[in-house]
């Protein structure tokens, strides 16, 4: 058995190294992943008198008199800024804004292809919390929304909180809300597999960073009992006597409302008799031991979502008795992938011109995402749809748009069917443009 595991690890290592090799070659070949192209017709140079001077002056005058017309006359209605300071890029840590730019470009590509949203990478040459907040605020005239990305904690919490309160456009942090939304969706369906109720189960959470903190919030909003959640950071379980946590409001709050049994220790102790473990901690394997999974309750759920390598290999977790295993990797079953969430979330948010993305909107989107797999098709190895199931994105868009309207934070009052059909057409258009440009050779084919 040990030999088989070693073979699997060697195979996985080689497979994991191949994308990095191709990424270097193809990023050099294409010199970036996105570009700006016209969306208006240009029949001849005379058209520039309409699109630019002198004709555009009439449009500018209209907007100056009635500012909301900017959403009708410009592409602001469909624009998102992907903002990062490069301090927590993937699993690489603080590698700087320039090194983070390829990731933000990739995010923009996903926004366009999966959600029909025009997104622009903006990497900031500052790590200062106040400067980041001020920069985002002064960018508001050009964008319909903001996606914060790869910003380290604890500053990511006040940055998001402040911008959500003070901005007139929706601001979202994908490492918090995006990860939590998709994790909750997968968890909803995992509970259906094992036949357990969220308000009855004990949940161990390994890692107390931005993602797991937001996941815990969403779990509680969905019905999890805070008393039955035990969170673990690098120093051990969170509890009321952990005075070192008081410097981070979010962690201290969790320490005071969770872990009613006052479990002391680390991951091993937190997982004992737990019905589920949700881990977003350090890259593994070996962060979670097989014997710890064996000590969990019957038919446990294991979400080992560290990247690039999960805290425990899926086959090890299953061998230890796990009924459902999810990771963050695309080469394993049950990938918990943020890309299942944010394209549809912003599509719907922009289409109803919502002023914010609330936590309850995220819960609604998570429930919608979970429902994209009918109950009779949910399996231990299929708790989430894949990005290939592209119709999940207009469904999420419609659900979140309707929720924003119900919460009275949307300026456009549209029906579910209208939002869904408009989103579907926008996404089909984006995919068709890419396919057409590939066929015509405007997106060159790399032979490597």
Image (cartoon, helix red, strand yellow):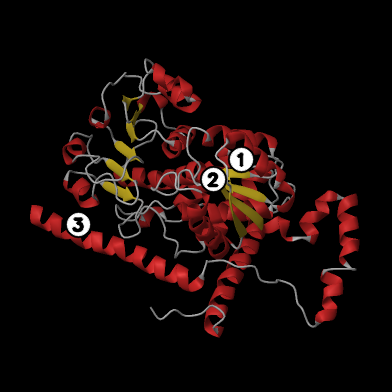
Residue occupying image coordinates x 38% and y 35%: 198
Give x and y (percent) for residue 111: 56, 59
Query: Which mark sits nearer the N-terminus, 1 or 2?
Result: 2
On screen, residue 447 above or below 188: below
Disc 1 secondary structure class: helix
Disc 3 secondary structure class: helix
Badge 1: residue crowd in 10 Å (few <14, some 14–19, many ≥20): some
The residue wearing badge 2 is 85
Number of the label disc, if any, that sits on residue 9? 3
Badge 2: residue crowd in 10 Å (few <14, some 14–19, many ≥20): many
Residue occupying image coordinates x 57% and y 46%: 125
Disc 2 secondary structure class: loop
Residue occupying image coordinates x 40% and y 54%: 384
Closer-to-camera residue (96/265): 96
Closer-to-camera residue (187/443): 443
Measure the C-alpha gap from mark 2 to mark 3: 34 Å
The residue wearing badge 1 is 132
On screen, residue 40 above or below 292: below
Badge 3: residue crowd in 10 Å (few <14, some 14–19, many ≥20): few
Query: Which mark sits nearer the N-terminus, 1 or 3?
Result: 3
**Which quadrant does the N terminus fall into?**
bottom left
Q: Nearer the viewer, mark 2 or mark 3?
A: 2
Q: Quadrant of residue 35?
A: bottom right
Do the residues bearing badges 1 and 2 touch, measured as CB atoms within 8 Å?
Answer: yes
């Amino acid at each position: 058995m040990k030999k088989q595991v070693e073979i699997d690890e060697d195979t996985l290592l080689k497979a994991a190294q191949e994308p990095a090799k191709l990424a270097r070659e193809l990023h050099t070949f294409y010199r970036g992943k996105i570009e700006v192209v016209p969306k208006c017709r240009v029949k001849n140079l005379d058209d520039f008198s309409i699109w630019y001077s002198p004709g555009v002056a009439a449009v500018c005058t209209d907007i100056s008199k009635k500012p909301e017309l900017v959403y009708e006359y410009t592409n602001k209605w469909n624009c998102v800024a992907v903002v990062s300071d490069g301090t927590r890029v993937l699993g690489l840590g603080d590698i700087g804004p320039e090194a983070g730019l390829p990731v933000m470009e990739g995010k923009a590509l996903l926004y366009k292809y999966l959600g029909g949203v025009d997104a622009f990478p903006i990497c900031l040459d500052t790590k200062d919390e106040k400067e980041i907040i001020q920069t985002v605020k002064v960018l508001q005239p050009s964008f319909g929304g903001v996606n914060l990305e790869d910003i380290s904690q604890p500053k990511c919490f006040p940055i998001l909180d402040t911008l959500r309160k003070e901005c007139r456009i929706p601001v979202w942090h994908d490492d918090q809300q995006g990860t939590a939304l998709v994790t909750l969706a997968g968890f909803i369906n995992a509970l259906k597999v094992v036949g357990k109720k969220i308000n009855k189960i004990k949940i161990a959470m390994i890692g107390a960073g931005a993602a797991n903190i937001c996941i815990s919030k969403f779990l509680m909003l969905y019905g999890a009992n805070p008393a039955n959640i035990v969170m673990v950071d690098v120093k051990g379980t969170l509890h009321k006597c952990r005075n070192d946590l008081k410097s981070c409001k979010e962690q201290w709050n969790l320490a005071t409302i969770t872990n009613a049994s006052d479990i002391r220790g680390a991951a091993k102790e937190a997982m004992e008799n737990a019905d589920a473990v949700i881990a977003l901690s350090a890259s593994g394997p070996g962060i979670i031991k097989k014997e710890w999974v064996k000590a969990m309750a019957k038919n446990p759920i294991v979400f080992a979502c560290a990247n690039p390598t999960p805290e425990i290999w899926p086959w090890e977790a299953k061998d230890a008795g796990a009924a459902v295993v999810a990771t963050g990797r695309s080469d394993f079953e049950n990938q918990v992938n943020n890309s299942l969430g944010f394209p549809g979330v912003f599509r719907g948010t922009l289409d109803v011109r919502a002023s914010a993305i609330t936590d309850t909107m995220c819960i609604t989107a998570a429930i919608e995402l979970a429902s994209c797999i009918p109950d009779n098709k949910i399996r231990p190895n299929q708790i989430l749809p894949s990005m290939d199931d592209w119709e999940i994105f207009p469904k999420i868009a419609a659900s979140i748009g309707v929720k924003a309207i119900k919460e009275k934070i949307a300026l456009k009052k549209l029906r579910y069917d209208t939002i869904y059909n408009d989103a579907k057409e926008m996404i089909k258009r984006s995919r068709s443009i890419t396919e057409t440009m590939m066929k015509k050779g405007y997106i060159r084919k790399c032979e490597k």
